[in-house]
Image: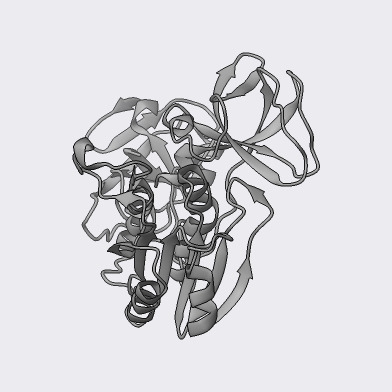
Amino acid sequence: MDGYALRRTDFLEAPARAFHLRGTSLAGHPCNIELGAFECARIFTGAVLPAGADQVLLQEEVTTATADEICFKTHSPDESYIRPVGNDVSAGDLLLAAGERLNPFNMAGLAAAGIVTVPVKSKPRIGIFSSGDELRPIGTSVADIGPGDIFDSNRFSLLRLFHRLPVELQDLGCIRDDPDETKALLHEAAANCDLLITSGGVSVGDADYVGNTIRELGHLNFWRINMKPGKPVAFGRIDACHILGLPGNPVSTMVTGLLLGRPALLRLCGGASPTPLAFPAKLDEPITRQPGRREYQRGTYTQTKSGITVRATGAQGSNRLSTFATANCLICVPAETASLPTGSQVDILPLFQFTE
């Protein structure tokens, strides 16, 4: 604050008395002033405090001023307006923990402490591919789409889902449902990636080769998980490379990519896997379902005067990507919960938290 530095005891003893002006302390310049009884110094924001001073009175509190004497309003100051050395951080304080992601806020703190460089972890190499004879590249002419063919949307979705994370993404394309082709790609990619994320080929069909190939080349930690959508999830490793096999249904790929893939990438970056933010909300309309698996329905929440309300975005089939297009959250339904009537309280996971 711009004002006048003085001794607080002097002002409290005789607030109406004139203080002798000894000089001025400017920001960015040394201050060689030492104050005695009933002496003050002009001081500006960021300037060094004169020796002996322990109070700054704001310039708005001046009543009369001459070349060498200053008088102030009679009052009891609420604060000193002094920021001592170490007020923000002290020697030995932790400024940035290992595993934290650099951002404008913690970098500002480093800059304020005069730190120019910090050691960082190399970006993990993430390979992404999809598998399926029915998949056709995005951009293929509709005239070239045969019966049973679909566009390869999953690989594109995963690449976009993770592109803001501090990782090195590798688009490994799409492979056919062929055991030899699957084995060759997994073997080569595992040697050049820290994590492979696959879409399709991990279910129980005769043409699902990813899970068995992981077993053959490495180790399969688990296969299938009690969630909906996303039951056929596989996780294992080949040598030093982790493998995360996601389902082929588009919504299943997106949900498991959000809830399983993203935390895995953050852990590989050296940080923690943050628990997603969840908020309570009341259903605007009923949810009909069978208990047994924890379910994540796509929904739209609205903030009202009485709280947050939410409703599902239509039919929740695992192929219906349109339910994501209008959604702004996932509605969490516990495994043991059956159908829920209107007004029931549920937890929601806002989707905005997954896009940074």
- Between 90 and 230, which is closer to the camera in this rendering? 230
The residue depicted at 48 percent of the width and 71 percent of the height is 243
User: Which of the 4 image quadrants contains residue 179?
Assistant: bottom left
In the rendered image, the quadrant that contains the N terminus is top left
The residue depicted at 30 percent of the width and 35 percent of the height is 69
Query: Relative to residue 193, is residue 262 depicted above or below?
Result: above
The residue depicted at 69 percent of the width and 26 percent of the height is 287
- Between 217 and 47, which is closer to the camera in this rendering? 217
**How many marks overall?**
0
Is residue 46 visible in the rendered structure shown here? yes
User: Which of the 4 image quadrants contains residue 265?
Assistant: bottom left
User: Which of the 4 image quadrants contains residue 100?
Assistant: bottom left
Q: Residue 109: x percent and y percent?
A: 37, 58
Q: Residue 235: x percent and y percent?
A: 55, 69
- Between 41 and 273, which is closer to the camera in this rendering? 273
According to the image, what is the colour scheme of the structure? Answer: one colour
Q: Residue 249: x percent and y percent?
A: 48, 47
The residue depicted at 53 percent of the width and 70 percent of the height is 211
